[in-house]
Amino acid sequence: MTTERIGVVGLGRMGGAMAERLAKQGFSVTGWTRSGLSPEKASALGIAAASDLPSLSAASDIIVLALLDDPAVHAVLDELAAIELAGKLIVDTSTVSPETLRVHEVRIKEKGASLLDAPISGGPEMLLAGTVGFYVGGAEQDFQRFLPVAGVLSNRIHHVGKLGDGASAKLVNNMMLMGLWQIMKEAVQLGGKAGLSRDKMIEILSGSPAASPAMRSRLPVILGETDNVGFPVSGVLKDMGVVFGLAGRLGVATPAIEAAHASFKEAAALGHGEADLGTVVRLALEGKT
């Protein structure tokens, strides 16, 4: 059992699953969230509750952030930089811009702490099973310190380079998935217009060399057999905004992602913003887009 104590900041779908998995694997876990952590939820997750960030920091050796977006990460890092951090390792698992953590690197180091970015590929159910992917950016010694924690959450751990490179790798990975749903949407629209049945199209596509584990795992959503949410349409749109921001700064054209963005935006406008991202294809199969 590790001697490192873990603090988790942000206990939404991803942070909550992470905290629960770590606690079940024998880690001492303390949680804090800006919206408040009830004793009931803390007990359900098997973790201790901190009343504020200074309390969480005092109870933790490694502080893991699982936050919604760039403003949330900036706000938490600003607050952390104002308290005692000597010897701490701060690991951000959020999907944010590669520049977000770099902005805070000097101040965090001046406080005696280290930073890693380690965005996650996969959903809460994969976190609970220990099968998500990690894309880690930062110093080798910090990566090695985080590895025992990452190893109980992930079976695909990539140390991709310096601080911020993890975020870049996550965005590149996300782009492939964003394009997948757009291409599948267009394929079923074309197949439907050409007279192919829904079931025959799904049979062909799910057995194709182009099929991916991500697509196969979403088939119950695509076929309308479940309303479970692995990752919502609204989350995809948020991540696309980060992709567009980085691509714009680097001068890279992203026409495929722009087409996918239009499809996810349309799904949200139809009232499916909090539905699973596979809903984009389901709507096309049903002739609603």
Image (tube, rainbow, N blue to C red):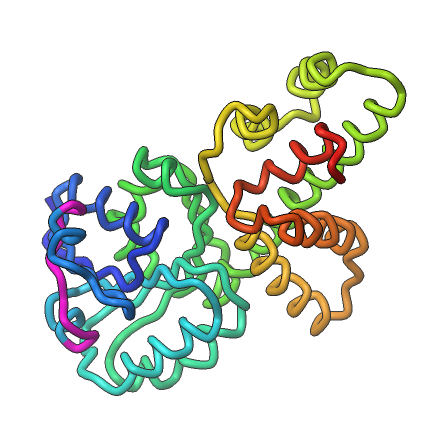
- Please give left or right for residue 8 compared with residue 260 in the image: left
x then y, percent, for residue 175: 65, 49
In the rendered image, residue 53 lying in the magenta stretch gets the answer yes
Residue 7 in the figure: left or right of residue 216? left
Residue drawn at (50%, 66%) of the image = 164
Question: Where is 102 relative to 96, above or below?
Answer: below
> In the image, what residue occupies the spot 28% across and 50% down?
16
**Numbered disc total:** 0
The relative height of residue 84 versus residue 130 in the rendered view (above or below) is below
Q: Quadrant of residue 68?
A: bottom left
In this picture, residue 143 sits left or right of residue 120: left
Find residue 109 and report its horizontal and vertical position in percent: 32, 81
Where is residue 201? Give x, y as percent. 74, 18
Give x and y (percent) for residue 162: 48, 65
The magenta stretch is 44-54
Residue in view at x 72 percent, y 15 percent:
204
